Amino acid sequence: MPQSPPITSPSNARLTERLEQQRHRIDGKLTELLPGEDAPPSSIHRAMRYSLFAGGKRLRPALCLETSRMLADQPNPDMESIACTLELVHTYSLIHDDLPALDNDDFRRGKPTCHKVFGEAIAILAGDALLTLAFRVLSTLPESSADVCAALVAELSEAAGTVNGMIGGQVADLEAASESVTEHGLEYIHRSKTAALFRASVVMGGIAERAEPTQLSRLAHFGMTAGLAFQIVDDILDVESSTAALGKTAGKDAAQKKVTYPSFYGVERSRRMAQECLADAKSALDSFGDRAGILRDLADRLVFRTA
Ligand code: IPE
Ligand code: IPE
Ligand code: MG
Ligand code: MG
Ligand code: MG
């Protein structure tokens, strides 16, 4: 059977530069939002900063900022803080995902995992603290109205929660290893554990700019479908890439008998499914016209990536 081409990125220097600028903005705001390393109790503040600044791609905050830019010429002045809350929740989910009781991983973002450096107790608490800080930030946004703050809290807490959200997906992911899983069950895991936070990333950009309900539902479809593609590619990279390139242990899914797209469908079919999701996601942006150019490029980057 002829092999489809590997998932490699068409070079997009404009997007790479833009993501670099966004990363800079996000890292600056995260530095402001986090308690200083020396603030007591310093062990947890060091652990929070260690994981947060270990070198993530910052894709979720970038999606949030770009959604806001697509909708508004004068973005909500709280946009950077809002985008940071996605990174706080994402980094918490990674610290907990790596714990011995979950995936038991030693490397993350090219460094030893939080629990390897700070011990399990502090790693658990650092995750809890990042999650808690995210909601403190959203509930104290200086420039946003109470209804916008409440809607942002609702969207993020749903995406992180147990019903079709990240925690629900993580539970199903753990339980899938010992149960037989259907194709719907597998899609549920990926939509919940990963895609829900991608949905929140773009929907929160929309909420911050007071988008119409029809716009929010198109953004939600875009985020869910692009997020599903992202997790399928994460599974493929776990099979095909290296620990050095990923900054996290490659080959872990097979070693832990995880049910993934490649284990269920094979790599070639998984690649095609990711590309189908990508096309579906981008079609949800049609009504936004040319202003959605960067979001379309970002969606490509979620799929055509090497790390
Ligand atoms: C990793 O997400 C966890 C998944 C949901 C697959 P990323 O690949 O975005 O991780 P960082 O933030 O760049 O480290
Ligand atoms: C985790 O999925 C998704 C999260 C909610 C953190 P994985 O377990 O596949 O993520 P990696 O491969 O460890 O980053
Ligand atoms: Mg996991
Ligand atoms: Mg994992
Ligand atoms: Mg993975």
Image: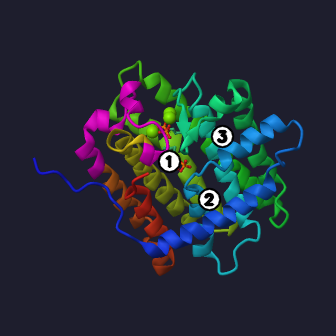
Q: Badge 3: few (under 14), some or many (20 or more) residues near its Cα, within 10 Å?
A: many
Identify the mark nearer the N-term, 3 or 2.
2
Q: Which residue has dot 1 on it?
A: 195
Q: Is the magenta stretch mostly helix, strand or loop?
A: helix
The residue at the point 35 percent across, 29 percent down is: 254
Q: How is this picture coloured?
A: rainbow
- Do labels 3 and 2 touch, CB within 8 Å? no
Q: Which residue has dot 2 on it?
A: 61
Residue 222 percent location from the top left of the image: 47, 59
Magenta residues, start to end: 244-272
The residue at the point 55 percent across, 65 percent down is: 214
Amino acid carrying mark 3 in the image: Tyr
Q: Badge 2: few (under 14), some or many (20 or more) residues near its Cα, within 10 Å?
A: many
Identify the mark nearer the N-term, 1 or 2.
2
Q: Which residue has dot 3 on it?
A: 92
Residue 301 magenta? no
